[in-house]
Amino acid sequence: MNTTFRRSALASALALALSQAYAAPVDLRSAVPAQRPDIDTIAVAATMPDLLILRAGAYDPASQRLDLQLSGAADAVSSRYAIVQFHADSVEAGRTQLQKLGVAFVAYVPNNAYIVRLNGTNLDALKRSTGVRAAEGYAAGHKIDPRLWSDVRAQLVQQEPEDAPDSHILLDIVNVRGFQGESSAQIEAALRKLVPDVRITARSQRADAMPYVHAGVTRGQLNDLLRAASALDSVAFIEPWMPTRVHNAASIGAIQSNITTSCSGNGAICGAAPMFDHDIMGSGQIVAVADSGTSPWVANFTTLDKGAGPLVQITSSDNPAPVPPAIGILYPDRKIIGYWLQPTSGATGPVD
């Protein structure tokens, strides 16, 4: 036999053997078509502790996997992030054990599950850890909002870029959200390299901000953008971007408004307008305020005097913050009955 031919045959055989030896393990779980869960489905799934509830569907990760072809995502699974589900009675013990392995918890997923940063821990070790019921790599298809799936993409409304709002250019613009601690600058650089005609209209700037990149393309390039963005380990989720629009220019502060001039807008209230002028006095009423934070030392909470001296009732957030879905200590006798801040990965924890 010709020496060159023998070497070529040997090289081919070795390549085949190596490819088989390092091939990804076959996923034997049954495929479940991805389907946007409606409210009723979520309500039922919430009572079944073995199910994961994602925007792409509800399924049992121990025996099922989502078929995410409609997402248009890359055929890729993150090497640095994973979803881990614990047995319902082993969540705390399981978290403690994984933290000892260096695993970081970055987001809660119902039921009894978390998205974690592996930090060098392999998936097999994750599955063998105390209390773990199921674990899987964070698939690219999980990252894409169902509003961007191929079967509904024609319904997308193109937007003017926020960096040139009067340009009359219309693009499909997506909000590419990164995991806490990832770099928006690096996400931007990767998208520019992978999608040459992409237009980056904005990105987060502060190092401590949740990273995001707003990226726009023509409709014909949206597939390329979604595949490229979903393949990046640093990306957590991709959703349609929509410009901020003020629907009520005369909205007032939740606690107090001292506007005395005339004001315009829908449902305008002018003049002093404390929260208690909105007919929400009495028992059995719940008011929720979602904001960047409260100032617990303001006069509303420290100077009320009914004849026995100032009443000071300050509601602070728990430190350390409770792990979702727990919300922390409630104070039913105070104006603000509870104050929950998202757990942070830094050393300072939540602050007021």
Image (cartoon, rainbow, N blue to C red):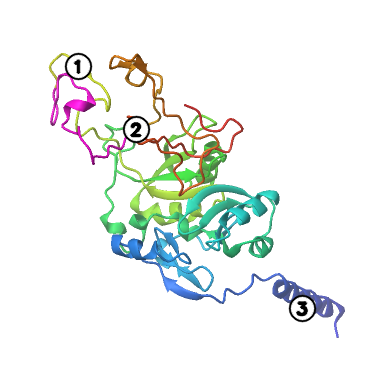
Query: Residue 210 or 253: which is nearer the viewer?
Result: 253
C-alpha gap between disc 3 and disc 2: 76 Å
The image quarter in which residue 315 lies: top left
Give left or right: position of 96 versus 246: right
SS at mark 1 in the image: strand
Say which of 9 and 228 sits in front: 228
Reply above or below: 260 against 321. Answer: above
Q: Secondary structure at mark 3?
A: helix
Relative horizontal placement of residue 34, taking residue 306 as reference (left or right): right
Q: Secondary structure at mark 2?
A: loop
Earlier sequence position, callout 1 versus callout 2: 1
Alpha-carbon distance for marks 1 and 2?
29 Å
Q: Position of residue 285 (x, y in %)?
A: 24, 39
Residues in magenta, as a range:
264-290
Tell me what residue is drawn at x 70 percent, y 75 percent: 20
Specify the quadrant that holds the N terminus. Answer: bottom right
